[in-house]
Amino acid sequence: MSVYTSITSEELTQFLTHYEVGTLVDYQGILAGIENTNYFVTTTQGVFVLTLFEQHTAQELDYFLKLMQFWAEQGIPTARPISNQEGQLLSILKAKPAALVQRLPGSTIQTPNTEQCYELGQWLARMHLSAQHFPLYRAPDRGHEWRMQVGQELLPYFQGTDHALLKAELAYQDSVNWKQLPQGTIHADLFRDNALGSDQQLTGIIDLYYACYDAWLYDLAIVINDWCYDTGELNESRLLACLQGYHELRPLTVLERASGVALMRAAALRFWLSRALSQRNPPSGTLTFLKDPQEFKIKLLSIIEATPSLEANWHTLSAAK
């Protein structure tokens, strides 16, 4: 979340007349993430998050907002979109699609503990299982084919050991048996900054704008690569807590347990590539925040080097269920 499109109080006041949320009291831009423009909006009836979408189509946004609504109705702590007076979840502001959603309680989880990782594993399993009944479909926009294509496009710009690492990883990922892994609707970007907590408990899951249909295990790997690492070092107790929480509600198959390390590598590759791509082609905007691609290159290397111990952690689950 960043601010690419600036709005005035007059424009926001006019926009809010289309909603039953009271009148504007205050608003401020949110500096986090890299995709859309976001503001905290305080009215006489509460606090909301306003998002102006910088890239997505109306069809994609219909999917995202209805998924947010669906998961909220299923008891998942996702932000519920607010309908305007015409009953629509999507509006227009500054000639861009815009949505107003409830602001969830809590704050960003900076350093999760084992209990929070266990709880997140459980929530992720609930999200995957419940979304089997969600009727809409969206293909992944950062899936396996994207990673292979973008990796090849960026390969000439990588030098030395980075070039060798990327070339080898692309070859490795091309051998992963993606089609045989259980698939479903996933969050696809559930980093710590896309979750909220209070009093050591998870209170919110936000920013569903990469949600799509892909391997469930890939979603779990994305979570592990962020929630279970500290300054590049894996925290095994948090890893086991996250895996156990998930596995208790949706037991991982034999193939998934055997593919866990491969999917952790795929998730690390995805964010290494997407951040490197953004670095080469930075978006213009006010308060724009670009994340360092080196973080996930280092994580990819650490996952490769720690493969034997990581495989042992995934194998431990076979005795749990």
Image: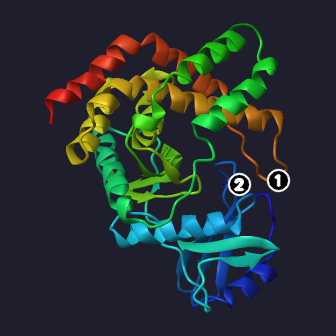
Residue 199 in sight from this viewpoint: no
Examine the image and state in which quarter residue 238 appears.
top left
Q: Which residue is mark 1?
A: 285
Q: Nearer the viewer, residue 73 or 77?
A: 73
- Where disc 1 sits, the SS reads loop
Q: Position of residue 88 (x, y in %)?
A: 60, 83
Crowd rating for badge 1 (residues with CA inside 10 Å; few <14, some 14–19, many 20+) = some
Q: CA distance from mark 2 to mark 1?
A: 8 Å
Q: Position of residue 273 (x, y in %)?
A: 67, 31
Crowd rating for badge 2 (residues with CA inside 10 Å; few <14, some 14–19, many 20+) = many
The tag on residue 2 is 2
The extreme front residue here reads 179
- The amino acid beneath tag 2 is Ser
User: Could you tell me which quadrant the C terminus lies in?
Assistant: top left
Is residue 39 toward the left or the right of residue 283 in the image? left
Q: Nearer the viewer, residue 113 or 186?
A: 186
